[in-house]
Amino acid sequence: MEWIGWIVAIIFFLVAFAGLIYPIIPSVVFIVGGFLLYGWIVSFEEMNWLFWVIQILFVVLLFSADTLANLVGVKRFGGSKAGMWGSTIGLLAGPFVIPVAGILLGPFIGAVLAELIVSRSGLKQSLMTGIGSLVGFLTSVLAKGGIMIVMIAIFILFVAK
């Protein structure tokens, strides 16, 4: 049964990493789901209270990294709250409206349009905000990917025999 637990956990972890590219996939749910399904199939014995406290802290860090990276990217390039919201909407809608390239173009276009329409910023400032949203998104992907790798490494340290 242990190998089935590992296969299921690995599949869930891979789906979680796909969530870095397609933000509609809730990465954190699949990471934690991999832990829970492994425990259900094999055993929760090795996943003690310390394991869960550490993982919960990393889950909070995952959510914070996502929001903070977008906020810092947009603000650092002079964007407003409208630019941040436009970037977020573009991030979610982009992959569906523009397959493949939408993951990068969505946040950029969303931030630019929000700055132009809501904040009435000039074209140059709106483009800078778009670039900031793109930098924020890429930073977020790297940070979340790193955090997820650490979470999985901790899982392996606790359950590997």
Image (tube, rainbow, N blue to C red):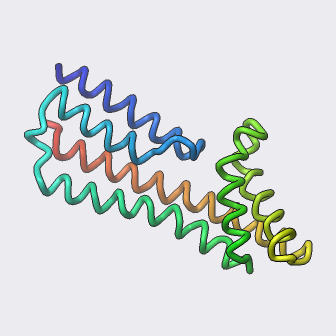
Q: For this rendering, which residue is in front, 105 or 111?
A: 111
Q: Point out the image quarter for the C terminus.
A: top left
Count of numbered marks: 0
View extreme (left): residue: 45
Side of 121 where 10 appears, left or right: left
Residue 26 image offset from top left, x and y in percent: 47, 44
On the picture, is 150 further left or further right than 46? right
Q: Residue at x 45, y 66 (%)?
A: 64
Residue 119 on image: x %, y %: 81, 76
Q: Quadrant of residue 50?
A: bottom left
Residue 90 picture location, percent across and down: 72, 53
Which of 147/90 is in front?
90
Q: Is residue 19 left or right of residue 79?
A: left
Q: Is residue 25 left or right of residue 105?
A: left
- Residue 65 at x, y percent in the picture: 48, 64
Location of residue 24 by image quarter: top right
Q: Quadrant of residue 75?
A: bottom right
Residue at the extreme right: 123
Vertical relation: 64 (above or below) 158: below
Q: Quadrant of the N terminus?
A: top left
For the point 18% across and 34% down, the residue is: 39
Task: In this rendered view, identify the residue nearer to me: 12 or 85.
Answer: 85
Give the residue at x 24% y 26%: 5
> Going 53% across and 56% down the picture, which residue do you hit?
142
